Amino acid sequence: MAEFASAVDALRAAIDIQSAVASLNGAAADGERMLFRIGINLGDVIIEQSNLFGDGVNVAERLQTLAEPGGICISRSVKEQVRDKLQCAFTDLGVQKLKNILRPVRAFHVVQPGEAAKPARPGKKPFLRNRRSLATVAAILGIFVLLAGGALYLRPWESIGWVRQASGPPTIAVLPFANLSGEPDQEYFSDGVTQDIVAALGRFSNLHVLANNATAKFKGSDANSAELKEKLGARYVVVGSVRRSEDRIRISVDLTDTDKNLHLWSRQFERKLTDIFALQDDITREITGSLAIKLSSLERDRAFAKETEHLDAYDYFLRGRARLADSERSALMEARAMFEKAVALDPHYGAALEALGQTYQIEATQGWTEFRGEALGRAEAHVREALGLSPELAEAHQTLAFTFLARGEYERAIAETRRAIEINPSDAYGYASLGAMLMWSGDAEGAIAAMERAKIFDPTLHWDSLHVLGFAYYLAGRHHDAVAILEPLTGGNPERYIVYLGLAAAYAELGRTDDAERAAKEVKRLSPFFKTAPFVGQWRDSKSRELLAHGLKLAGLE
């Protein structure tokens, strides 16, 4: 791949290269000849260290597949630039629909010196070769992407990293990195590094990244590519390990293409522990570069934004986040203490401030404080401070959304959740949260769409997300679907009385009286003081309240 300052320079170089290769082939034995195909396109590209990204690259790559062996294929934009400036003839190949390129491209074959002109071939199908042959390497080397004012850039063909998606954004699963430190209490660190890499990758709109919940069960697993593809539906899988010593850290990463059962590359990164943030950036760049993901500068800035350079603050943040994952009030208090220490060490640590605010939001919504309004006020204050420092912090918009929802401010809650999804379009939790917001506001169909989207990124959604989908199905009149979602979620945990509520109403609407009565009894057992009126009163719209109250009444719940 090469980048030139002008289309004329690019085409002149392409002709010189093909001429030189032809001369070498003339002196070579039959089995030693190589034929290059070259594609040239004119367009903007994104430069990221030693990689180029963007539609300009993708179109050039597709154009080279149209070229004959030893030939050059250019786009219409290139032809317009070089016309009358080089002594070349062109054969019109017509408008071509290129793979994974939205707009058709007018393509032209360049008639090189000594080559007889060919008649126009409008609509000619692309000339495809065996992608595993040596010609593939040559074609990759021969992609020319043009950017006005750019400089020459060459990438060695030994580098792996030209994986192309078949259609739509590829799905990637990052399995929990193994803790090789020899100390179980360092598990939070390897898990935290994994989560941060997942979060960074998730901010690229052209990449579907599975949520941590979806991959957690594969921690320490020796599942092969076929099993991972079947169970996760991921085209690419990243596995890794973290070895942390007193002052150094070593992270090993492997990337596999599950479709081809092909190990794409392995990398080992070792730095001083104080360089952990740069190390995570290196890993993210390697993965996205190898997948040839089209990035925008905004997305790149979001992915590589630094929240803190203070290692001890980051360590407290990871410890707090690990405790926050436990659904216990004592764990919440421990997490809050950790986040407070992180903020004390770095008052400008946006992620830690957001997490601190989240502890107050959870405390209020779980009913773990008698001063609910005060807790929600603290949550909003901390989150707004975090957003002042880090406006692109998706988690802050999520926490703010749930704070608004707790106050019954539905529109503001939905707006904040949509903003979080804009920032991180691969966040299963974001879509699940949007589904909850829409369900409580009475938009059942919108909630179903959002929750189904969440399941793409996390096929193993937590029960407290799936029960939302069950209620959305019920409110949409899809009672069989509601039962199918809710039945597997039943259990003796008192928190799950809400699952039995949904089942009781759905069973009753389906005429399954005995099942409805059994579900109603479970509701009364798990929540002895349950009353229908305050429960259905949580919905914003009267239609949803009426539908749910009707089903619960049929089931014998008042």
Image (cartoon, grey):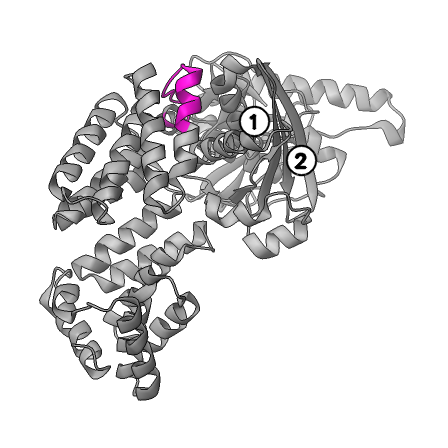
Residue 7 in the image, given as x and y percentages of width and height: 48, 20
Q: Which quadrant, please, contains the N terminus?
A: top right
Relative height, residue 67 to residue 43 (above, below): below
Q: Which structural element holds mark 2?
A: strand
Q: Disc 2 residue type?
A: Leu
Residue 17 relative to residue 47: left or right: right
The residue sitting at 33% across, 62% down in the picture is 494
For the magenta stretch, what is the residue range?
A: 302-317
Choose between 295 and 285: the one closer to the eye. Answer: 285
Q: Mark 1 and 2 residues: CB-CB less than 8 Å, in contact?
A: no
Choose between 290 and 144: the one closer to the eye. Answer: 290
Residue 140 relative to residue 495: left or right: right
The residue sitting at 28% across, 26% down in the picture is 353
Q: Is residue 384 magenta?
A: no
Q: Disc 1 residue type?
A: Glu
Mark number, residue 264 = 2
Choose between 365 and 474: the one closer to the eye. Answer: 365
Q: Earlier in the sequence, mark 1 or mark 2?
A: 2
Mark number, residue 51 = none
The residue sitting at 47% across, 23% down in the picture is 83
Q: Which structural element holds mark 1?
A: helix
Query: Extreme left residue here?
Result: 542
Q: Which quadrant, please, contains the C terminus?
A: bottom left
| Res 489 quadrant in image | bottom left
Q: Is residue 51 visible?
A: yes
Relative height, residue 213 to residue 526 (above, below): above
Choose between 409 and 73: the one closer to the eye. Answer: 409
Q: Which residue is mark 1?
A: 286
